[in-house]
Image (tube, grey):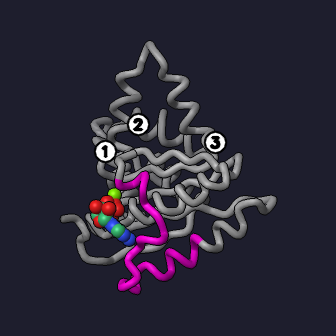
Amino acid sequence: MPKEMQDASFKNVYKDDKARVPIIKYFKEFMEHYNDKEKPKGLYLNGSFGSGKTYLIACLFNEMAKKDVRGILIYYPEFLRSLKASFGTDFKEKFDEIKKVEMLLLDDIGAENNSSWARDEILGPILQYRMENHLPTFFTSNLTLDELEKSLATTSSGVEKVKARRIIERVKQLTITLDLISKNRRV
Ligand code: ADP
Ligand code: MG
């Protein structure tokens, strides 16, 4: 995780932006209900580049870490690359760690080089496991869920709408969708 995300804190969240209010409200509820029998759902946070999606979720993860809840934020396109590079070495450890961690953020889903391998062998099983075990799972994306579905359908193996649909169904089971439409905060 980059340093600025390690330091992300609710104390520093811009308060001038109404777009953040529903997200902060959701986070409060998430923290209140984390120890319920059924853990709260994660977020599918959709929005434009630089609007602060990753930063906001990093705030929540850092807050939960203070309560000893372990979360991992992974930049999804890079995770796929490193997973591929770990064939024959620690592939299974890497894969299992992501599958089983208490809280997971798949950051920038939809920005990866999509392949049927990534969709069917990696993403599908991770989401399936996390769904069955009620493990809170978060996504950020520049794409809406409809756009993500289209993107996942098309790989070099052709257009496979049913397989993409199945992934989206899991994402929907795991999350509630919120938008963060805001100006670019990157400097
Ligand atoms: P996104 O993930 O939507 O592309 P980021 O979360 O990377 O956007 O945010 C863009 C930039 O703005 C980053 O440098 C981040 O540190 C900064 N930033 C975003 N939200 C805040 C905030 N609430 N307080 C301080 N800095 C922020
Ligand atoms: Mg981001």
* The residue positioned farthest toward the top in the image shown: 88
Q: Which residue is mark 3?
A: 129
Residue 19's disc is none
Residue 99: x, y in percent? 58, 38
Left or right of 133 on screen, residue 46: left
* The residue positioned farthest toward the left in the image shown: 187
Left or right of 35 on screen, residue 64: left
Magenta stretch, overall SS? helix
Residue 118's disc is 2
Left or right of 131 on screen, residue 120: left
Q: Which residue is mark 1?
A: 112
Residue 116: x, y in percent? 38, 36
Query: What amino acid does circle 2 point to?
Result: Ala
19 is within the stretch colored magenta: yes
Cβ atoms at labels 1 and 2 below 8 Å apart: yes
User: Which of the two labelled residues, at mark 2 and mark 3, occupies the earlier sequence position?
Assistant: 2
Q: Quadrant of residue 183?
A: bottom left
Residue 142: x, y in percent? 31, 62
Q: Is residue 83 visible?
A: yes
Q: Secondary structure at mark 3?
A: helix
